Image (tube, helix red, strand yellow):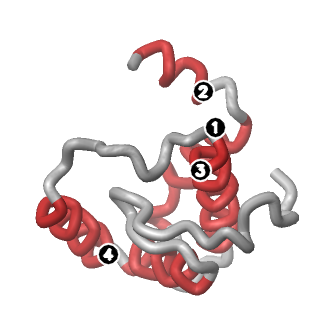
Amino acid sequence: MIAKKHEELDDPDTVKLYSLLSGALDWPADDPRIVEIADIMERLMIRAVEAGEVGTDDGIDDQFVDLLDSTTAESSPHAARLLEILEERGWKGWTRIARVPTDRLNAELPPS
């Protein structure tokens, strides 16, 4: 697990995501950087799908996943807006990606 974290920190998208998220609490609710976060998260989710890391049994109870997702959405206007953007793009869920739109796979994404 630690090796995976080190590998993730070599990924420019992950580093940029962490950098953006570290300051997000101070942003106004309608800050346009939320879209940039959504772009990065979508690229990371597509990579996870393509690597076969999505859809596997994660061992987490569905009710717990629902609780985590609803708590995240209610925790800040940023989180709620981010979930809205991702859902508009066809992605569902926060803790577990519930649906993967095949037309988004291998689609041209915003540059990293």
The answer to whether any part of residue 28 appears in the image is no
Mark 4, residue position: 73
Which disc, if any, is residue 15? 1
At numbered mark 1, what does the secondary structure look like: helix, strand or loop? helix
Above or below 26: residue 23:
above
Q: Position of residue 30 (x, y in %)?
A: 56, 85
At numbered mark 3, what does the secondary structure look like: helix, strand or loop? helix
Q: Residue at x 72, y 69 (%)?
A: 104
Residue 98 quadrant: bottom left
Q: CA distance from mark 2 to mark 1?
A: 6 Å
Q: CA distance from mark 3 to mark 4?
A: 23 Å
Q: Earlier in the sequence, mark 4 or mark 1?
A: 1
Q: CA distance from mark 4 to mark 1?
A: 23 Å
Label 4 is placed on what type of residue?
A: Ala
Q: Earlier in the sequence, mark 3 or mark 2?
A: 2
Q: CA distance from mark 3 to mark 2?
A: 19 Å
The foreground one among 22 and 98 is 98
Q: Would you say 49 lies left or right of 97 here?
A: right
Q: Position of residue 29 (x, y in %)?
A: 49, 82
